[in-house]
Image (cartoon, grey):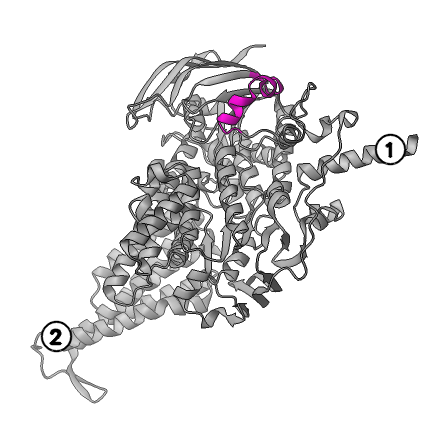
């Protein structure tokens, strides 16, 4: 096998960060047709490495590099600008910002035009790559009309059209619903089989990818490689380091570690690898059903509908939420989850119907009172930041209520303490890391002790440790009696925390049940709602099946 | 649907040339005839939604009326005071009335020509044609196209930021000063995300092999054919016809 990529003693330093190297002394090789998972905590320089591999750095870098990157036998810096795109294709995070044209075919053609493919061959190539990602039917569609998963596949198609021999995917499934995620992974798998390109995959969520490759490259916070090799082996030998760096493990592995820490056997990475005979008493899962008389009715929505330019987004939803519930709102990308949560929070007015809180219509609440009752955490934390320091950010709503400086100080300190942000109190909110920003935005919403907290995809794009901190924070709020509603794609989260699940499908409320009841639904139905079973339930089902089999045969 | 299928660059050039022509005409009748000719051509040769057309035309019309009135009201005292015209109970000197009429008709005519272009041209086609026919540098052209995609995104983002700040309990601003400081607060998150998005788009374009080089091929090719000369032909014919009449 010939070498596709060779990175030799590569070090990169940003001018803005003179203290440390962002990437330090990297050495690795990748063969043609080989795949690699690049893992590491947020901010460890994974994306920077991508920029280096596709020749953007050092050309556009404010800083310095040492060492060498060789792509296909030629130094990366020796390629002419634009030329390297035919060797290395990168699909970046957030497909939305990668497009510069308005329709699907134009977007794919853009890359072909850049590398000077003659007009007469373009049509054929465009059809071919759209076929590969199953978007041929959307060739003439406007990009804005595609769903999240489709956009991600289009971004992939645009890169595939250039026929690179190395494909780099930067968090290709972030923010996709479980079924769309599976789709994208399958698409990538089939593409690799067909084109035999090398793959570098940067991901937080490992599930599904481990079937593609076992080799992983682990980066730590200082931008050093601390492991290069088989993932299974890494989990067996370097578990502590993995956990310390906040790198996600596959969920099956997590489950096994939690339930059976002293095992001599190899840990499974996927559900398919579970050897049922090595199994153990299965712990009972979260089987709580909706407590019928749990609390008092709290939020009541009656017949709410919401339309945007005659397009129905929410369609006639009625329900009652009770005090002390932990609610998960789930559904496919674009099923109206976010809109629904905003209507519940009184941020968006429905076109029809009404929402009442404590038997009072939202419309009759004073804005300031309403905000003391409901907190809402937006998907992008930056949108909610107002002040210039972390401290002021949290103090803001207290000052609005004319509290004395002493109380403000005391409360802010307490909240910062619980959120683990105390040492950052003088920083500007924008300079925090992704996970810290998220925690800060939650902190600003809990400082007032609002009894009802709504969150829009709070765990999106975070590494394992900041995720755990965030969920700890929410759990604390929940224990102290708050009602929490959360829009999410993360089935594990629902399984671990939620007491009630609302499933939205095309703007309608199609199911309102306890998690355990949801997992008991026929699999076709879940598939239709774009949901998947959480790993823990999959394992349980797997055990049960084997158990039945054993009982029958004996 | 001839107009919608014409080469956009040629169409744009035609409009520009005719606007220059119009600048030299001070005779209301010529401008009036040509105005009718332009509007007729728009509807005969183009596929245009007339309701929308009227709606867009209305502001120009109001502007033209205003122009008519001010030009008459502030005209120099006429030398030929014996030639007058009676209108709406007012007695006006004929020549200043004619100049005013020509001016306002000219506004309407420029508007009609521009609308003809806008209503029958696809924005993306126009930019692609500018690169291919008029040699606009791709760096600028594709930058404009990418920016064009950004506008709706920014609009959505403003809405979200507005809601997000509302949730934080920021006062919605009753006085002018409050409103101003509200928009100042919007500016930072909006700019921060716009810069980040723009950077991402630029990086993505570059890694798709975009260098801004003129040496590129085109999926959607635009050519100038004989058919494209029909429109300038028709309009110029109309203009000269109106001139000699």
In the rendered image, is residue A440 in sight? yes
Q: Quadrant of residue A83?
A: top left
Counting from the top left corner in percent of width and height, residue A228 is at 53, 16
Q: Is residue A458 left or right of residue B148?
A: right
Q: Which residue is mark 1?
A: A549
Vertical relation: B203 (above or below) A453: above
Numbered disc in front, either 2 or 1:
1
Counting from the top left corner in percent of width and height, residue B162 is at 38, 57
Kindly state the secondary structure of the residue where label 2 is placed. Answer: loop
The N terminus of chain A lies in quadrant? top right
Q: Which residue is mark 2?
A: B74
Report the Cα–Cα distance between label 2 and label 1.
100 Å
Q: How many marks?
A: 2
Q: Chain of mark 2?
A: B
The magenta region covers A229-247
For the residue pair A64 and A122, the one nearer the viewer reads as A64
């Amino acid at each position: 096998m010939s070498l596709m990529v060779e990175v030799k003693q590569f070090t990169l330093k940003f001018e803005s960060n003179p203290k440390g190297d962002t990437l330090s002394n990297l050495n690795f090789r990748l063969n043609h047709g080989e795949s690699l998972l690049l893992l590491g905590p947020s901010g460890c320089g994974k994306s920077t490495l991508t920029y280096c591999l596709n020749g953007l750095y050092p050309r556009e870098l404010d800083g310095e590099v040492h060492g060498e990157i060789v792509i296909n036998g030629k130094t990366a810096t020796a390629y002419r600008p634009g030329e390297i795109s035919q060797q290395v294709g990168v699909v970046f995070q957030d497909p939305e910002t990668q497009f510069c044209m308005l329709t699907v075919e134009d977007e794919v053609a853009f890359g072909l035009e850049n590398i000077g493919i003659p007009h007469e061959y373009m049509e054929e190539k465009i059809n071919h790559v759209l076929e590969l990602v199953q978007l041929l039917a959307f060739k003439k569609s406007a990009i804005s009309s595609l769903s999240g998963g489709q956009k991600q596949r289009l971004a992939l198609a645009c890169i595939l059209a250039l026929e690179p021999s190395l494909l780099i995917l930067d968090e290709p499934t972030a923010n996709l619903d479980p079924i769309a995620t599976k789709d994208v992974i399958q698409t990538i798998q089939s593409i690799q089989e067909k084109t035999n390109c090398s793959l570098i995959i940067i991901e937080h969520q490992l599930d599904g990818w481990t079937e593609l490759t076992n080799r992983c490259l682990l980066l730590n916070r200082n931008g050093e490689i601390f492991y290069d090799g088989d993932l299974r082996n890494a989990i067996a030998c370097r578990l502590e380091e993995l956990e310390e760096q906040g790198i996600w493990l596959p969920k099956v592995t997590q489950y096994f570690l939690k339930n059976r820490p002293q095992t001599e056997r190899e840990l499974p990475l996927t559900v398919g690898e579970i050897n049922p005979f090595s199994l153990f008493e299965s712990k009972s899962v979260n089987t709580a059903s909706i407590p019928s008389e749990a609390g008092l009715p709290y939020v009541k929505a009656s017949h709410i509908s919401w339309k945007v330019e005659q397009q129905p987004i929410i369609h006639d939803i009625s329900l009652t939420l009770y005090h002390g519930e932990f609610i998960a709102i789930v559904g496919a990308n674009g099923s109206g989850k976010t809109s629904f949560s905003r209507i519940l929070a009184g941020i968006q007015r429905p076109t029809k119907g009404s929402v009442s809180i404590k038997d009072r219509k939202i419309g009759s609440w004073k804005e300031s009172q309403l905000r003391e009752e409901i907190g809402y955490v937006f998907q992008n934390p930056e949108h909610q930041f107002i002040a210039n320091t972390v401290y002021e950010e949290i103090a803001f709503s207290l000052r609005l209520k004319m509290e004395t400086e002493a109380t403000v100080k005391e409360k802010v300190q307490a909240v910062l303490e619980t959120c683990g942000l105390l040492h950052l109190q003088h920083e500007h909110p924008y300079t925090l890391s992704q996970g810290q920003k998220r925690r800060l935005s939650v902190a600003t919403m809990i400082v007032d002790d609002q009894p009802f907290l709504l969150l829009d995809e709070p765990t999106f794009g975070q590494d394992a440790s900041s995720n755990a901190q965030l969920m700890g924070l929410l759990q604390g709020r929940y224990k102290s009696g708050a009602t929490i509603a959360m829009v999410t794609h993360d089935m594990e989260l629902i399984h671990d925390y939620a007491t009630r699940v609302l499933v939205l499908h095309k703007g309608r409320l199609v199911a309102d049940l306890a998690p355990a009841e949801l997992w008991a639904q026929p699999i076709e139905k879940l598939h239709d709602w774009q949901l998947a079973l959480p790993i823990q339930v999959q394992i349980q089902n797997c055990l049960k099946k084997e158990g039945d089999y054993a009982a029958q045969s004996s | 649907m001839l107009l919608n299928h014409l080469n956009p660059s040629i169409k744009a050039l035609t409009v520009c040339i005719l606007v220059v022509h119009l600048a030299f005409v001070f005779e209301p009748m010529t401008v009036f005839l040509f105005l009718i000719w332009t509007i007729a051509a728009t509807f005969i040769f183009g596929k245009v939604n007339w309701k929308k057309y009227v709606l867009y035309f209305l502001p120009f019309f109001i502007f033209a009326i205003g122009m008519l009135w001010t030009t008459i009201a502030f005209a120099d005292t006429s030398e030929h005071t014996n030639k007058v015209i009676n209108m709406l109970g007012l007695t006006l000197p004929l020549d200043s009335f004619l100049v005013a009429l020509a001016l306002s008709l000219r506004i309407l005519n420029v508007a009609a020509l521009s609308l003809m272009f806008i209503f029958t041209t696809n924005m993306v086609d126009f930019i692609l044609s500018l690169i291919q026919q008029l040699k606009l540098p791709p760096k600028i052209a594709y930058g404009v196209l990418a920016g064009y995609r950004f506008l709706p995104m920014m609009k959505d983002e403003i809405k979200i930021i507005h809601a997000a700040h509302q949730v934080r309990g920021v006062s919605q601003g009753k006085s002018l000063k409050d409103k101003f400081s509200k928009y100042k607060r919007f500016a930072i998150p909006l700019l921060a995300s716009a810069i980040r998005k723009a950077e991402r788009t630029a990086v993505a374009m570059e890694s798709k092999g975009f260098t801004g080089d003129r040496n590129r091929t085109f999926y959607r090719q635009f050519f100038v054919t004989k058919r494209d000369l029909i429109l300038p032909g028709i309009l110029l014919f109309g203009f000269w016809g109106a001139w000699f009449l």
